[in-house]
């Protein structure tokens, strides 16, 4: 059973410090990923096939990299009707929410001068969908749907293959969301292929989607050749609970996060020592019944935290320091505290707003900043799949209006050529 820590104690300070330092690079992995990227750039498809056999235990032929439409037809036919309906409903809700994020360009008109901004969709996007411990059709929806809403025409989904093939629900989600194709490749090699292209993989403009540390490292290393959404680390939830909170709900949401990954962090800040003790007992009892208790148990052992704090205000202060991916306010008046929350990827108000709701069907994106990056980063959205272009149109009168300002600033920076470019147009200088 987790030990309840008292805010301000040496043990509590050490635990918070451990949570803040949870993520970090690994030089050995950096070197391995760099070699994989070099190999994919040099050897193309051959490298993809070799790494797939080595890391995934699946031997592919070149023609197997792209999943054929007939294969998708057969696979999605096996999806249970109730699961299909759930995916369809989630897709509709995610699309509805993200349509509200669409940006419009604008124009500013003056005499002789017109300026503005044009918003256009990216041309090609690659979406990484994790394999491994679990299948994630929800991740497909959360990445592909906002790209489609933004107007991206070409979307490639990559996902690691297994000996049993790609999970049918993942293929169905890709089809429902509007992906252009699905590829049987994963890991750092898939990221490299999307970033630089191979014989079978067209390079993209941006790569989104979560993955393990190798995928995250690869995304960091290819950034610049392509854009990326974020460097996603292990998932995390922080729950602020006062005496009105149900300890069973708190424990359930902590375990829902812990079952993702042994490196996941599940944190409860309780304003009552009695509540804190009840949460730890509920965790122990519910963990014993959880199918993924091995993963969840290791997560709780490493990063599970139940901390007794003096007040909700103090809990919010700690939450802002940690800047969690998911922040749940299981308090009497949750909306009252929302304005005090400065750093969180997503905020869940009230104990019926479980984080699971956000993961699947509420509508907002579940691709969220982790590891404290909520201090400066945002959830994935339509705005991640567009670019903005400045527009400047000027006639002689418009140039003349600003000529003196441009001239003085250019000369102050020692860039006389900039000033002369204006003067020549107005007949005021140059040979």
Image: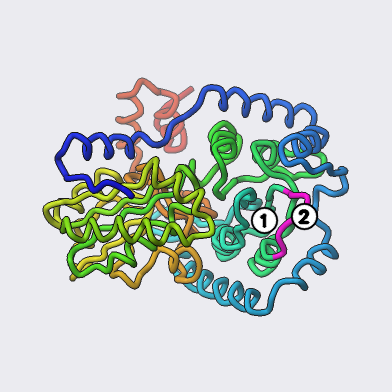
Of pointers 1 and 2, the one earlier in the residue sequence: 1
Q: Magenta residues, as a range?
A: 161-168
Colouring used for the render? rainbow
Asked whether the beta carbons under mark 1 and mark 2 sit within 8 Å of each other, the answer is: no
Which residue is at a point 22% across and 67% down the rendered structure image?
334
**Residue 155 has which mark?**
1
How far from the left and from the top, in percent, is residue 183?
75, 51
Q: Would you say 177 lies left or right of 372 here? A: right
Secondary structure mainly formed by the magenta segment? loop
How far from the left and from the top, in percent, is residue 347?
32, 61
Label 2: which secondary element: loop
Q: Is residue 395 visible?
A: no
Q: Would you say 417 lies left or right of 196 here? A: left
Give 335 or 251, whichever is nearer the viewer: 251
Q: Residues within 10 Å of mark 1 (few under 14, many from 20)?
A: many
Q: Would you say 290 lies left or right of 135 here? A: left
Give 422 or 240, whichever is nearer the viewer: 240
- Residue 164: within the magenta? yes
Q: Residues within 10 Å of mark 2 (few under 14, many from 20)?
A: few
Label 1: which secondary element: strand
Q: Is residue 194 visible?
A: yes
Outermost residue on the left side: it is 310
Alpha carbon of mark 1 to alpha carbon of mark 2: how far? 24 Å
Which residue is at a point 16% across and 44% down the rendered structure image?
7
Give 65 or 424, whichever is nearer the viewer: 65
Compared with residue 56, is residue 420 higher up or lower down, i.e. above or below? Answer: above
Which residue is at a point 58% across and 75% down the rendered structure image?
86
Outermost residue on the top side: it is 414
**Residue 164 has which mark?**
2
How far from the left and from the top, in percent, is residue 216?
54, 39
How far from the left and from the top, in percent, is residue 15?
28, 38
């Amino acid at each position: 059973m987790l030990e309840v820590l008292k805010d301000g104690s040496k043990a509590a300070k050490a635990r918070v410090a451990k949570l803040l330092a949870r993520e970090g690079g690994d030089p050995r992995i950096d070197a391995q990923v760099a070699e994989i990227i070099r190999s994919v750039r040099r050897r193309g498809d051959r490298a993809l096939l070799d790494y797939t056999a080595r890391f995934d235990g699946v031997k592919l032929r070149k023609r197997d990299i792209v999943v054929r439409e007939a294969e998708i037809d057969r696979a999605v036919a096996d999806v249970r009707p109730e699961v299909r309906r759930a995916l369809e409903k989630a897709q509709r809700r995610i699309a509805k929410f993200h349509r509200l994020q669409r940006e419009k360009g604008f124009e500013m008109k003056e005499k002789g001068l017109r300026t503005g901004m044009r918003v256009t969709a990216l041309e090609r996007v690659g979406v990484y969908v994790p394999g491994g411990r679990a299948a994630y059709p929800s991740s497909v929806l959360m990445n592909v749907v906002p790209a489609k809403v933004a107007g991206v025409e070409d979307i490639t989904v990559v996902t690691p293959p297994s000996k049993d093939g790609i999970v049918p629900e993942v293929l169905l989600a890709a089809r429902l969301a509007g992906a252009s194709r699905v590829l049987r490749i994963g890991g750092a090699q898939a990221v490299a292929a999307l970033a630089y292209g191979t014989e079978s993989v067209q390079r993209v403009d941006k790569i989104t989607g979560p993955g393990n540390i190798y995928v995250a490292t690869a995304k960091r290393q290819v950034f610049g050749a392509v854009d990326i959404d974020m460097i996603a680390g292990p998932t995390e939830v922080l729950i602020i609970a006062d005496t009105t909170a149900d300890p069973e709900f708190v424990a359930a949401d902590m375990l829902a996060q812990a079952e993702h990954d042994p490196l996941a962090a599940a944190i409860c800040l309780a304003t009552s020592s009695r509540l804190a003790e009840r949460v730890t007992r509920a965790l122990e009892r519910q963990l014993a019944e959880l199918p993924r208790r091995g993963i969840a148990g290791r997560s709780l052992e490493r990063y599970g935290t139940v901390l007794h704090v003096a007040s909700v205000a103090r809990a919010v202060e700690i939450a802002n320091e940690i800047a969690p991916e998911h922040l749940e306010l299981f308090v009497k008046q949750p909306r009252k505290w929302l304005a005090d929350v400065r750093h969180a990827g997503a905020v869940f108000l009230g104990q019926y707003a479980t984080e699971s709701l956000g993961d699947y069907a509420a509508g907002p994106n579940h691709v969220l900043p982790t590891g404290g990056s909520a201090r400066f980063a945002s959830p994935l959205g339509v705005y991640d799949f567009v670019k903005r272009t400045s527009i400047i149109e000027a006639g002689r009168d418009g140039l003349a209006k600003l000529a003196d300002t441009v001239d003085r600033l250019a000369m102050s920076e020692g860039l006389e050529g900039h000033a002369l470019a204006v003067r020549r147009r107005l007949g005021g200088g140059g040979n």
